[in-house]
Image (cartoon, grey):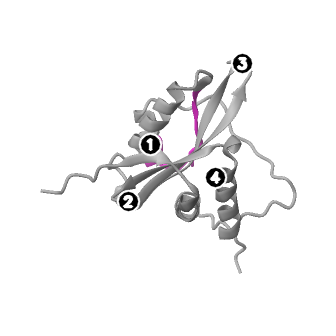
Amino acid sequence: MSAPPAPLQIRRARAADADVIAGFNIAMAQETEGKRLLPQVVARGVRRLLEEPALGFYLVAEAHGDVVATLMVTTEWSDWRNGRFWWLQSVYVRPAWRRRGAFRALYAYVTAAAALEPDVCGFRLYVERDNRAAQSTYRTLGMHETDYLLLEQLRAGVVYLQQDS
């Protein structure tokens, strides 16, 4: 018989969580996209969001005082809906905690928090095309694929990946 999962505590991240969150973001990019992020850029990005709440917020899931999962929330204004979408980003669950309810607990917390904000009209996230396990999890929670294709153009000089030597 296996031991029951440890109880998870969900909370807003604080400055002391910055290094763990940055490490999780680096691990997620490597695992899901094979991208090697520049640690110093990620660390500055995490700290900036923690210092500037208008940019968004992070949630962490803790078990026995250790952070085992994180997600970031940023917002997008929708004039069509006269409301904000909460974008769920930088989702990472330690491998030992996958399929044990950590993301589900974070998602339950974020949906409860959004219910207290009258102008939140929904949630959005993007997921790597080949990450079938994550897609299955998101669909199970009621999310579905949209009709939109995501495009981007980075400003010249934005560097966030390590260069292969």
Q: CA distance from mark 1 to mark 4?
A: 18 Å
Provide the residue span drawn in magenta.
122-135
In screen coordinates, is 81 left or right of 90? right
Q: Amino acid at mark 1?
A: Leu
* Nearer to us: label 3 or label 4: 4
Label 4: state its secondary structure.
Answer: helix
In screen coordinates, is 82 left or right of 58? right
The circle on residue 106 is 1
Q: CA distance from mark 2 to mark 4?
A: 20 Å
Label 1: state its secondary structure.
Answer: helix
Q: Amino acid at mark 3?
A: Trp
Determine whether 32 is above or below 132 in the image: below
Residue denoted by label 3: 80
Residue denoted by label 2: 65
Q: Tell me the residue at 45%/34% (across/down).
A: 139
Q: Tell me the residue at 74%/42% (across/down).
A: 151
Q: Tell me the residue at 57%/26% (across/down).
A: 117
The one of 124 and 114 positioned closer to us in this rendering? 114
Which badge, 1 or 3, comes first in the chain's sequence?
3
Residue 21 visible in rendering = no
Q: Crowding at label 3, few (<14), some or many (≥20) Cα neighbours within 10 Å?
A: few
Q: Amino acid at mark 2?
A: Gly
Residue denoted by label 4: 50
Label 3: state its secondary structure.
Answer: loop
